[in-house]
Amino acid sequence: MRKLALSDDILMQIEKPARYIGGEVNSVMKEKEKVDIRFAMCFPDLYEIGMSHLGIQILYDMFNRREDTWCERVYSPWTDLDKVLREKNIPLFALESQDPVRDFDFLGITIQFEMCYTNILQILDLSRIPLHSSDRTEKDPFVIGGGPCTCNPEPLADFFDIFYIGEGETVYDELLDAYKTWKSSGKSRKAFLETAAQIEGLYVPAFYDPEYNTDGTLRSFVPNNINAPATVKKQVVMDVTDASYPMNPVVPFIKATQDRVVLEIQRGCIRGCRFCQAGMIYRPTRERNVDKLKEYARTMLKNTGHEEISLSSLSSSDYSDLKELVTFLIDEFRGKGINISLPSLRIDAFSLDVMSKVQDIRKSSLTFAPEAGSQRMRNVINKGLTEEDILDGAGQAFEGGWTKVKLYFMLGLPTETEEDMREIARLSDRVARRYYEIPKEQRNGKCQITASSSFFVPKPFTPFQWAPMCTAEEYMRRAGIVKEEFHSQLNRKSLKYNWHDAQVTVLEGVMARGDRKTGKVVEEAYRLGCLFDSWTESFHNDLWMQAFENTGIDPDFYNLRERGEDELFPWDFIDTGVTRKFLRREWENAMKESVTPNCRQQCSGCGAARFGGGVCYEGKN
């Protein structure tokens, strides 16, 4: 009988104890004496958030298919349990075995969002693993990071032994095999890291030295160990159809953020929006075979008991066999109580027809993401969407019976003028006007148009990586201009406007383009009590500002200046396939308000063709 790490008394006094007990349907149990490698896979946020993440489910399944490896899961304990663990001196534990994380060979942490960085330190601290990789001994697990934020791992460089750059299905087996050999060799911890550094896609930060100019910019970034390559190449799975996929995903005990079967239909995006990091780093676009997806859908629903299936992709409408797949799902599961979720669709006639079959129109809302109010700004960001497209889509939706529409915008984009800001409100009003063009007797009451603004954050490996940000005060001033314009619209009673937290945006900007020095701020913020920074109720901007002051690091240096064309960036040692030359050309195209065709219309020579497949080679023999 498995013994829980927490007593009944503790479980009774904390919120949602099911977060911490494991034993869910499809969780994997093994005899620890019969495996050579124990891998703790961590999502540094709440259980409900982490259980919704497909990437961890894929790696969990892939690792546990190995007879010599047992992969278990660990999530950030909420503040109530965090307090108890510290007071009662209980080490953080993995869900399956309930064993302390420090007893494992590896602690793998997926890094999805900059505002989870203090949670990573919480995981290490509660696990009793030294925060700094330089302080770890042969008794400590190797701490390895993966996920989209490893595009710029430098703010976290001091805390990780290894970063895995790119998609996880390619070289993890090679790493685990190397670990088994090292484990039986009696060699030093450094010797294993030297072996790891020679595996393509693995970055060992201790083997690199940054040097800085007097103005604070990076002067050089070179290896200090002969085993470390000057350039680390992103890992890409070219055959996504036959890549490992979890047919028996773990089913949470409590409602997760996305409590459903997830079908990843493709990776990458053909669109080329200039602010979008995912659209650049996941190139080239690769599609999964539609027949395989049909098989996955049947199997996963049967193995989980879930009542919803969601299609996962950056832009689902661009999947070639979308019509065939959606028609199959509707026909196959009709009358079986299965909901079908279709995010990331362009609102066109086909999408509306499909959604009318799978949604309750009276309750559901449709989402458009124009990103900018004016056509000029949409050209700057290469959105590839005209106002006619937006109004036509909205009109078809209204005529189809929908009355609720959500519009997503971004404030603070490069070259933005006050006129561009005001156009957000005016476009929203024009969408509402389109509704009221329908004869009154054919309408379903009033329409509700909800517009939301996030604030622009320049990300590495995008054409906007050279761009300056705004201060929090300036972002809020711009939101105020938009709000004021909403009040002056004809259909203001049908319009609602929301905006994000500008203070969080500023921190996200520092971490997104930060260098190794910014790790000191993360550590100091954690020491001061920052945790769950992406959660409004636990975000403390004053403590973060104190951390900047205590460490002598100026956030404005990272956010408010436009980078020079030839400035060396902290992430330039990573080769994502997309070239810096292409990104710079796209930055210049943005300044000229010039639109670049999507990848299916015309190849723009971004560099991703070097991977030898995907959309770059469609139609070629």
Image: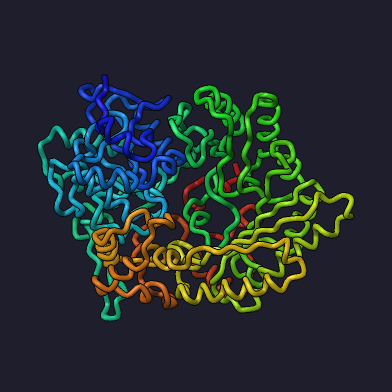
The number of callouts visible is 0
Taking the image as shown, residue 52 lies to the left or right of residue 217, namely right
Residue sitting at 71 percent across and 70 percent down? 426
x, y percent for residue 128: 18, 45
Q: Is residue 471 above or below residue 161?
A: below
Residue lying furthest top in this view? Answer: 1
Q: Could you tell me which quadrant the N terminus lies in?
A: top left
User: Where 609 sits versus 621, above or below?
Assistant: below
- Image coordinates of residue 102 in percent, x first then y, are 20, 39
- Give residue 219's position: percent from left, percent from top: 28, 73
- Dividing the picture into quarters, in which one does residue 518 lie? bottom left
| Residue furthest out toward the bottom | 214
Q: Which residue corresponds to the image point at 19% horizontal and 60% vertical from the top-left?
A: 224
Along the line of sight, the residue nearer the viewer: 517 or 506: 506
The x, y position of residue 26, in whole percent, is 42, 25
Q: Residue at x 79, y 46 (%)?
A: 401
Colour convention: rainbow
Q: Quadrant of residue 69?
A: top left
Quadrant position of residue 374: bottom right
Q: Is residue 48 visible?
A: yes
| Quarter of the figure that contains the C terminus | top right
- Decide which of 25, 234 is in the foreground and name it: 25
Whether residue 581 is visible here, answered yes or no, is no
